[in-house]
Image (cartoon, helix red, strand yellow):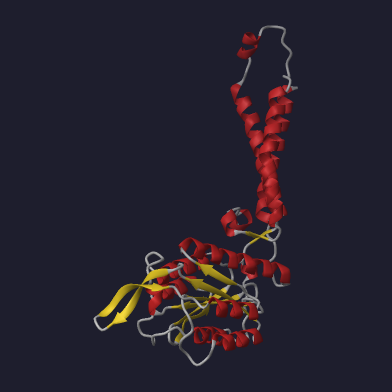
Amino acid sequence: MLDNWNINLTQFDFFQPEWLWLLMLVPFVGWYLWRIENKRKGDWKFSSSAQIQKKFEFKPIVYVRQALILGKLVVLSLFIIALAKPFRWNDKDAQTEDYKYGIDIVLAIDVSLSMLATDFKPNRLEAAKEVAKEFIDGRRGDRIGLVVYSGEAYTACPATLDYEVLKNQIDHTDGMNLEPGTAIGTGLGTAVVHLRSDSLKSKVIILLTDGVNNAGDITPQQAAELAKAKNICVYTIGVGSEGVAPTPVVTPMGVRFENQPVEIDEQTLVQVAEATGGQYFRAKDEKSLWAIYDEIEDLEKRKMVDKHYQSEPPATPGSFLNWAFLILTIILVTEFGLFVSNE
């Protein structure tokens, strides 16, 4: 019952968000109504001075008329929001056991030793974790899984809607127990296998690495062909600044940080992305990494709109219309009462 009156905009997405641009007109409408109110002729005629007329002024009426203008602007805003067709992914009617409203996403994150380089703060791996968790928080109705890889790969978390469990796995992810190296093909192949044949029609892998494929039994190109055969879109992200970066190196005296050249096989990452209908991105700092995830999110949203799934949750503008009609009724009753009192 309370959902019928819920107008918390943070809980809604919109099928036709372009209507929301009309909200920019609301301040101008308010200015116009305010101007009309200020120029409105009085209901009584006086032949005396303005000072004497002030004695007959009833202040509460002024405040009521100002509140009526504000109420009209609120009603207009609510009708505009309703035109944008708001909906919620977590509505009871929009949830089904096959999760056919969202998409399947697997994050394949490189956890090799070089990911501890400090050209990102505090290092590449921790920066990648934080951005991945923020990306997860912005999803609605998507199953998301996690694959980690260095010289070998494993599934750290199956695709799930329990984002808190997934983010906890990301927090505890590292490459300490994996073979050294950077097996990009193995990491991608593991993510592809993870996306089962009964996955959603829209399947995405976001593969992040800072190096060159130098381990594993499958090349990145072979893994890309497998992804293409299963209709999986792969977005690849190369992480690392230009030039040299403080990078951990294993020496006889233990691990120490040395300035090492940043080597990312961008040509291979471009090939993998293009072969599967995705895109390659280069993140040279934390800010650009945040922007890349935002761009990937926008790309996938546009794909969802283009496909126009018949199984989308229904638009639910009812709560906005309920408040609009309630406030409109109060306005009409109040204005009628003011009119009668002036007769």
Work out whether residue 300 or residue 222 is closer to the camera in this orientation and state it. Answer: 222
The x, y position of residue 61, in whole percent, is 63, 25
Work out whether residue 340 or residue 37 is closer to the camera in this orientation and state it. Answer: 37
The x, y position of residue 325, in whole percent, is 70, 46
Q: In this view, does 333 lie above or below 321?
A: above
- Residue 321 visible from this viewpoint: no
Total numbered labels placed on residues in the image:
0
Name the residue at 67% across, 66% down: 302
Name the residue at 62% across, 17% down: 57
Q: Which residue of the protein is positioned furthest toward the top in this rendering?
A: 48
Work out whether residue 190 or residue 3 is closer to the camera in this orientation and state it. Answer: 190
Left or right, residue 190 beside residue 113:
right
The x, y position of residue 71, in whole percent, is 65, 38
- Residue 220 visible from this viewpoint: yes
Left or right, residue 176 beside residue 83:
left
Q: Quadrant of residue 77?
A: top right
Work out whether residue 216 or residue 167 is closer to the camera in this orientation and state it. Answer: 216
Q: In this view, does 147 lie above or below 39?
A: below
> Which part of the image, by quadrant, shows the N terminus?
bottom right
Q: Quadrant of residue 192?
A: bottom right
> Which part of the image, by quadrant, shows the C terminus?
top right
Left or right, residue 215 beside residue 266:
left
Q: Which residue of the protein is positioned furthest toward the right in this rendering?
A: 343
Q: In this view, does 194 lie above or below 303?
A: below
Q: Is residue 126 above or below residue 215?
A: above
Name the residue at 59% across, 70% down: 141
Left or right, residue 101 beside residue 135:
right
The x, y position of residue 220, in whole percent, is 55, 85
Q: Which residue of the protein is positioned furthest toward the left in this rendering?
A: 253
Q: Which residue of the protein is positioned furthest toward the bottom in this rendering?
A: 217
